[in-house]
Each structure stands twice: as structure tokens, then as C-alpha cells.
Image (cartoon, coloured by chain):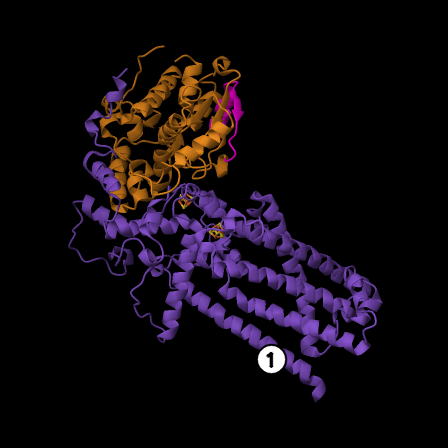
Amino acid sequence: MSNTIHVPTMASLFAEGKQPEVLFWVGCAGSFDDRAKKITKAFVKILNKANVSFAVLGTEESCTGDPAKRSGNEFLFQMQAVTNIEVLNAYDVKKIVTTCPHCFNTLKNEYPGLGGTYEVVHHTQFLKDLLDTGKITIEGGKFTGKRITFHDPCYLGRANNVYEAPRDLIRKLDAELVEMKSCKSRGLCCGAGGAQMFKEAEKGDKEVNIERTEQAIEVQPDIIAAGCPFCNTMMTDGVKGKEKENTIAVMDIAELIANADDL
Amino acid sequence: MMEYLPQVLFIVLLTAGIGYFAINVKKLARNIQLGKAVVINDNKPQRWTNMFKIAFGQTKMVVRPVSGFLHFIVYVGFIIINIEVLEIIIDGIFGTHRIGLSVLPVGVYGFLIGTFEILAVLVLVAVIIFWIRRNVIKLKRFLSAEMTGWPKNDANIILYFEVVLMCLFLMMNATDTSFQNLNSGNVVSQFIAPLFNGVSETTLHTIERGAWWLHIAGILAFLNYLYFSKHLHILLAFPNTYYGKLIPKGQLLNNEAVTKEVKLMMDPSVDPFAAPAEGDAAAAVPDKFGASDVTDLTWVQLLNAYTCTECGRCTSECPANQTGKKLSPRKIMMDTRDRLEEVGKNIDANKGTFVPDGKQLLGDYITNEELWACTTCNACVEACPVSIDPLSIIMNMRQYLVMEQSAAPSDLNNMMGNIENNGAPWPFNQQDRLNWTNES
Ligand code: SF4
Ligand code: SF4
């Protein structure tokens, strides 16, 4: 396992008069959450291996404002958006890739109306593209015979109709892709969206992530694949709640691919 | 003179039926226009396609194959059997009998009526299965808290209506001796006719007339029942799917009034005390951010409320509802309609102006607890067979709670405080955003 990763910042490239092809928007979870940081690194390793010209904003990145907007605080959201757009436009950013479907949705759909128009892709789409253009190859070997089920993140699937890119990648792993009873456009939420991640759930008879984890366990997977740091946390907690952490792993698509390649 | 009496009676009945319906349609349009103005004139081809596919073609109904198929039968039956109503109306006005026979070859007429009879039977079967699903099998989807009282009765009443109308139609054909003698098109009614063997010609004719009159009276009653029922969707599904959301489901519209304010705050060159430019409506700060009552919603959201079929597809897919939370997107739509009706009645009772009644949608109908349980997952929007967007109402009301009342749960206030202070929902310093690169 190589542990050295190369992560240029926009500021450093700018100082050298360089412009990367794509900006990697890391997101708050990807920057600060211990579990999500692993996803961030896995993705960077793939980017490094494929020699992708990219950079991050680093300390110039700030929350997209998604959780504020979904909480109803349009003021705070727009303040965040306008500040971020100023930075992005100053660097003349054209294309953004992000490992978080919430950042993806906000940057792609809600920033243009405030003056920030970019080509925004989710990392599963980006990876699919690297694969299609031959910039990466996926060695299936490690996952042969493993059952993998994909949990559709609401903000990637229903919100933006991206269902196939992550599945295409899983198929390349020579694994057996098994679908839960609610999948794709009928996929059940993990329970984190709409700022629920940051508050206690309302009174009910169950947690949403437990319900979803039960659906996943029904199809007896070895791995629950996710494409969102928040879903990842919720499903990981769910699997622990069901005491299945020794038999079922929760992994991001980027981690699956990095692992397949021993990155 | 007496011979014209039935025609006169018919015209009076028809005028009254259609007239009362027109009054209700006017009221409906007035109520919908109580919503905020939004202009929707983009992407017309896409909108027509959506209407054609979703409302006319029922594409969203097949997601649940059993109810989708049954509903399709009732829907097709309803539309096609209505062609028969055209004949009834012409006969009624001009005092003719089965005018179709004098303009169409017997074979064609028979084919048409035969089709209607078969459809009538299929509709009967479908409606009975629907009734069993609701009342015997008691599907969970039809049993939520909001489905008691009127909504429950409404659903059954309409089923009884259909049964009676279909039976009257078949009965009318079975007791029509001249039609039976044609022996063309009486595919179903020929099996009912023998039941009346031995009944005198006059009695038979009376029964036939009775069925005929009750049939048309029933249809007019049905038409006027719509306004008070979830069955308004028969009509409103068409405009509602036309005006449905076209942008990605994840995109929530940016509040333009807020944009103005934010620009003022961020841009030092803007003079905050300058008078807004003439005619620049959006520059004026709105009286309220977000929505606390139906009049704060847009007319499309109000149209949504009247269109809701109360089918509960949204609620049965809702993660919050599935895990026992109070939130039910169907209830959000039903509450909106109920409150809108209440506001409408208030206006009617007070000569055209709304007199404050100390109530509003927020609190009196929809509680904070429901609103905060939403994960904004869009499952309800995806599930709705008639393109309703319950999430947009939830979001508008959350905006009111946060921006007007600062009434967010304290955890969310902490989260927002963090974003404001350090640019992340957690209390981490923005300067530490790159630390992950050096951690093993
Ligand atoms: S968006 Fe909200 S109301 Fe709609 S299904 Fe999801 S949680 Fe339920
Ligand atoms: S909003 Fe749509 S899905 Fe929900 S009950 Fe009404 S018609 Fe059915």
C-alpha cells in the first residue's frame, strides 16, 4: 500500500501559473469526518494513479450551504454560496468533481442561479469516465464471488437521476451486484438527508438507517456499497446496530476501486 | 304540449347540473389564485409530453402493477363510456331515442354499445376489488390517521357511485326492448334481459326510462360531487402534470428576495439606503420569508393540493413515515387543501375579503414535528402519480420556521452556527481543512 498522496491546492498551482483540469471539491465530511477522510484519500489515490490533473481548494473551501438550505435557512445558504462562488470564479474553475452527492447537487443545481456555473460530476461518474477512456483499469480479482449491494444516495439517484455509473463500476469488480427490494428510483433514504444528520430524529418507532440496513441485510451482501459519506456513516451505524460489522463491510465505490488495485 | 315535458325537464336538469358545476369551478380557480404568482411558460413541448404520458398515459401508475391495472380499467371505462353520455344528452334534448342508430350503421352502433357494456362489467369488477382492498384487506396505505372520517367515506362513496352508474347503464340496455330486438351490441345486457321475462311491456318501458333518467342524473351528480372529493384529480391531473417540476428533483429554488438581501450585504458598492428602482418588485423585502399559511404558497402548490388523489403512494414510500414518525406527505397535501377550503369559505362568507380567523396552515394543521422529520429524500415526489411536490411545501414552511421564527431544533441551530463561524457544520476550523492530507 502506498501511503503517499499528492494533493495540489488551487492556490499553489495558481502561483505557478497552472490551471488543473478539474477541481476536487472535498466537502466538509470528506475533510473532517474520520470515516469520510478515508474515502477522500482513496479517491485521491485513484486520481494520482490515473495522473489526473486536479487540485483542491483546501483552506479556501467552505461548506456549500446544503445543510443550511435544507434546514430552511436560505440566508445562510446563499451567503455560503456567494462566498464560494467568488473563490471558484476567481480561479476560473470549469469542472468540479465531488465525493459527496449533497455538494454535487448543490454545486450543480443551485449555484448557477447565484452566478456559479460549472460542469459538476459525482466521483462515480468521474471514475466511470476514467474507466471508459482507459485511464484506469479495474482488476476484479479481489472481489470475485463477493455479493455487493448498492445503496442509492437520494441526492445522487432520485435527485439527479444518476443510477448506473456506480453500478457499472461495481460490475467491473467481477462481484455479484445484488439489488435491495427498494433500489434506484425507489431507494430508501439512509435517514441523513435534509440536515437530519445533525439532529436527533423525531419520535417514531425506528431509526431510518436501521430500516434501510435491514433491507440490505435481507439480500445477504458481503459489502454494502455507498456513494455518499453521510449514507456511509448511517449504514455503518446500522450494520453495527444489527451486530453484523464482522460479516458486512460498508464501503464507498472509490474505496472498492482503490482496494481492487491495491492502492 | 305534454309530450315536450320530458325534454323541458331534461334541459332544466342538465342546465342546473352544469351550472352548479361551473360555479364550483369558478370557486376552485379563485382559490387556486390565492396562491402567489409564478410564471411557468418554459419548456412547453416537455410539459405537453409529461401531461400526455403521466396524466393521459398513466405511466406512473404501473409502478404498482395491480392497482395500476385496475385503475387503468376504471379510467378507460370512464372515458369511453362517457361517449354514451353524448347520445343520452342529444336524446334528452331532442326527444329522440338512441339517436346513434339513425346516424350509424347498426353494426357500428352495436359494436360501440357492445364495447361499453364489456367495459361496464370490467369497471364493476375493478371497483369491487378496489372496495375489497380498502374495506376487507385493509391495505396499510389506506389506513393512516389522515384517512378517517370524510376522506375514508369519500373513497367508498365514489366506488358505490361507479357501481350504481354501471348497473343503471346495463339495466337501461337490458330493458330496452327495441335495442334487445336488434340483437347487436347487447353482449352483456342480453343475459340480464331474461330476468324481466313476463314483465309487461309498459312496466319494462318504465324501468328503462327510470334507469335512463337515473343514469344521467347520476352522472350530473357525480360531476358536482367532484369539487368536494379527491376525485377532482380526474380533471386536475391534466393541468397539474403540465405544471409539474421539470428541473432536477434535488434542486430547490433559490429564494430571490433573499438573493437581493445577500447581494446588498456582500457588495460594499451597493448603497443599502438607496430607494429600490421603480418597478423592481423583487427589490421590496417580502412581508414574510417562507410559508406559514396557504396564501404564502404558490398557485402551483395550491393546484397540487386540489389534485391530490389521497392515494398515499407518497406516504408509503416516505422514510419518516415508514419508521413511525408523524410526517405523512399525503397529510401535508390534504391539510393544505382543507385550509385552502377554509380560507375560501371565509372569503365567501365575508363578501369577497378574507377576515383573519386566527388560524393558519402552520400549527393549526401541520405541526413543527412533522416538518422537521423530513429527510428531503424526494421519495414522495417520485412516487406521486400526478406530479405533486409535497416536499416543496415542507421546505417553504421550514423556511418560515427558521427565518421568521428562529424555531429550528437546537441541534440545527448549533450546526448553522458552525457553518456561519467556521464554514462547516461541525466545530472544526477552516484552516484545518487540509489536515487529512498529512494524516496516515
Ligand atoms: S421528502 Fe420528506 S416527506 Fe417526502 S418522502 Fe422524503 S422524508 Fe417523506
Ligand atoms: S401527493 Fe400524490 S402520491 Fe401523495 S397521496 Fe396525493 S396523489 Fe397520492
Q: In the rendering, at what x and y percent does residue A179 appear?
A: 52, 29
Q: How many marks?
A: 1
Q: Is residue A118 visible?
A: no
Q: Is residue B400 left or right of residue A260?
A: left
Chain letter, disc 1 residue: B
Report the quarter where the N terminus of chain A lies.
Answer: top left
Name the residue furthest bottom: B1
> Residue flagged by tag 1: what amino acid is it?
Val
Residue pictured at 46% horizontal, 25% vertical: A128
The answer to whether residue B99 is above or below residue A82 is below
Vertical relation: A50 (above or below) B313: above
Q: Residues within 10 Å of mark 1 (few under 14, many from 20)?
A: few
State whether residue A177 is above or below residue B191: above
- Answer whether residue A9 is magenta in the image: no
Magenta span contains residue A180: yes
> From the viewer's perspective, is B319 left or right of B360?
right
**Residue B285 percent coordinates (x, y):** 24, 56
Task: Give how far across and how far down residue B391 sits, in percent.
Answer: 40, 48
Residue that lies at the very extreme toward the front in this rendered image: B136
Q: Residue at x 63, y 59 (%)?
A: B78
The response on whether ligand 2 sits within 8 Å of label 1 is no
Quadrant of the image for the C terminus of chain A? top left
State whether residue A51 is above or below residue B175.
above
Residue behind mark 1? B12
Q: Which residues are magenta?
A: A165-182
- What color is chain B drawn in? purple
Q: Colour of chain A?
A: orange
Tell me what residue is drawn at x 53 percent, y 17 percent.
A145
Picture coordinates of residue B192, whole percent (x, y): 77, 63
